[in-house]
Amino acid sequence: MNVLDIMTARPVTIRVDKTLRNALELMDEHHCKHLPVLSASGHVVGVISDRDCRYALNSPFVQRDNWQKDVLIDRVPVRAVMSPAPIIIEPDALASEAARLMLTHRIGCLPVMRGETLIGIITRSDVLIAFMNVHQRYEELAHHPESM
């Protein structure tokens, strides 16, 4: 199984000069926890996660109700909070290699690049869903070998 088989294609991105509010609104709107960060010229320069945002706001929770009260949310640029120069992976790499990289580097996602172009993102959730699907198929085959 390759990264291409389980990644999220065309991920939601954010520009490096946007604010924490912009990042949190995008994550909330698209139900995601990671955003690749793009430079003005469209190159991937970082990744920002919901955890990065919580740390920046010094809060274990990032709730929409508190956004209006927090002055920092409009003042802190994404570039100040993002993880710069992210580890990337190619779409033809094995999914197990993506999992190994995420575990080794203790990160939750990898931008998927074809050359200089961002084509997707693979997250821990993508890997876990793929594992569950493979396991389910294995269980089906084990209980019904005639379907092989």
Image (cartoon, rainbow, N blue to C red):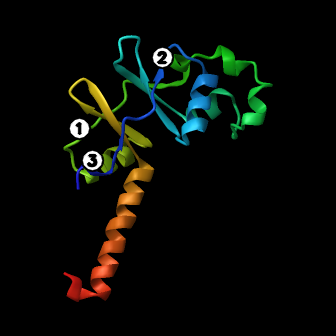
Mark nearer the N terminus (2 vs 3)? 3
Q: Position of residue 135 (x, y in %)?
A: 35, 71
Residue 50 appearing in the image = no
Left or right position of 120 against 50: left
Q: Are marks 1 and 3 in contact (CB under 8 Å)?
A: yes
Residue 15 in the image: above or below residue 101: above
**Residue depicted at 42% across the width and 25% down the height:** 46
**Residue 24: horizontal and vertical position, in percent?**
61, 31
Residue 90, numbered label: 1
* Quarter of the image where one finds residue 12: top left
Q: CA distance from mark 1 to mark 2?
A: 23 Å
Determine the residue located farthest toward the right in the rendered image.
69
Which label was assigned to residue 128? none
Tell me the number on the disc at residue 16: 2
Q: Which residue is mark 3?
A: 3
Q: Secondary structure at mark 2?
A: loop
User: Mark 1 or mark 3, which has the lower sequence index?
Assistant: 3
| Residue at x 40% of width, y 51% of height | 126
